[in-house]
Image: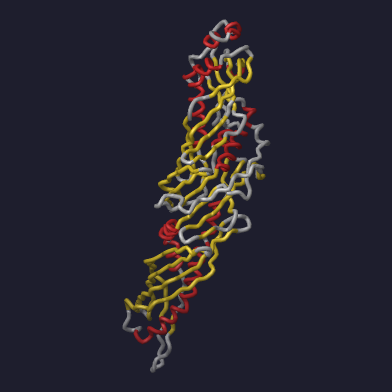
Amino acid sequence: MHFVWLAAFLDGSKADQREPPCEKVLHICPCTIASRGRIEVAVRVKQEALQYACQTGRAPLQQALQVIPIPDFVGRPNLLGSLLKIVGIRILNVQLPQVSVKLVPNVGVQVSVVSDLHIGARLILVPVELRVGTSILLDVRVLRTAAGFPVLKVSACKSLLGDVKIILGGRDLLGFLNPLQSHLRAILVNQMCLSISSTLLQLNARLGTLVGLNSFSPVSQLHYTMIEPPVITGDYIDLDLNAVFTLMGKPLVSPARPPPFSLPQTSGSGDSMVVLGISEHLLNSVLAMAQQFGSFNFHVFRQTSASIGHLTTSRLGSFIPAIAHQFPRPEPVGLKVTVSKAPIVTFFEGRAVLSLHPSVEVVAALSSWTSASQSLFTLDVDVALVLHFAVTEVKLQASVSLQGGLRFVLVSSRVGSVKVSRVACLIASAFEEALVARLNAVLSVGINLPCLNNIKYAHPHAEVHKGYAAVSCGLDYEQ
């Protein structure tokens, strides 16, 4: 999982070069964000997703069957004492007319593979070609390892062979068809189960990427893990995941316990393959970490914002006498914005609201605001913004828009009495523009959602419900 909040914050080239660099490092130690044993993300994999996986995974199944070795066949002696020996038996081609998956409630997944094997061989110097239909039925259980990873286990397998059909060189084989068929059955019945089972179990390595480590930055990571074995119904598999944040390899534990949530049975659009439920607590944990790293702090000055270029000490001095007295010549005025408390996301039915309470220090820039700015007064601001979610490939991204007006409150002043309402009229537009731009830049990088490493989410649709957000999507398999 990659977040601009940390990566950009630790990389000075990504941050505003005018911001004091010391603030970027000293916030590492206090981070105490994590969750254990708590549902942060609910992943619902529908029957349609499993069927899609079967269709896109045909090639490995075909390869597994095609490489099954078949020993030579030696027929019993005929009345003249001669033998029939067929050599070089190999599977030339495999067709899979049907690959299907059926969910078995509270048990697992039943995989059915129907194949058509085209077999080639030689009878002395004469080429021989055969065709035989097969069916393989596997019972697969979806379990949880002690480390919280999903794992597949084949609990049963049964395979059947149909009648062997001769499609080339048949005249010389008619008397040996039954023993030849028995020879193929003795080899293939067991080998097909072993080959297909082995191919399915190779998915376990890829399943680890569903809940594996996701890097924030060179020093921080997020690790999804399964809390319990999955819940399996006739329509879907539900995986409940929690999140452990780590900094320099050490888990960061949060004392806050999120309220439980689960996806309703009818959650998600009708044509979706996967539904992801995102908890409030996960987003708030990420925002809290970002805040501790100073990612929401910014400066607004005429060098960075045209909206505040008009504001000078002369304009403030027109209604704050101490400023007029202190600055007889007009000096540029800037804003230093600090978010000292973590923003809070709240999910209501149909909308998500981000609340934060930044402090705005109004300063006179003098000749070089980074080294010679002079503090005038400080305001606290109550801000509420609406979050808009989007999913790109496997990332949950967000943008914000202001909800309602801004509420400014005077905290401290070095210039005596301040008419907050008049100051607010002068700085509100520049502050709002810079705040929204800063938040959008941070949130647009996004959170990597749990997903297999070669699967992307397609046609996502995000909905916000009380306590959680649900993302319904299809799947796009990348070779």
Where is residue 78? Give x, y as percent: 39, 91
Q: Nearer the viewer, residue 460 or 136?
A: 460
Where is residue 395? Give x, y as percent: 49, 43
Q: Nearer the viewer, residue 14 or 458?
A: 458
Q: Please tell me whether residue 151 is drawn above or below residue 399 in the rendered image.
A: below
Where is residue 439? Give x, y as percent: 51, 31
Q: Nearer the viewer, residue 444 or 355?
A: 355
Q: Is residue 46 left or right of residue 39?
A: left
Q: Please tell me whether residue 246 is drawn above or below residue 9 in the rendered image.
A: below
Residue 66 quadrant: bottom left
The residue at 41%/64% (across/down) is 99
Q: Is residue 145 visible?
A: yes
Q: Is residue 217 visible?
A: no
The residue at 38%/94% (across/down) is 80
Q: Nearer the viewer, residue 351 or 88?
A: 351
Give the tally of numbered discs.
0
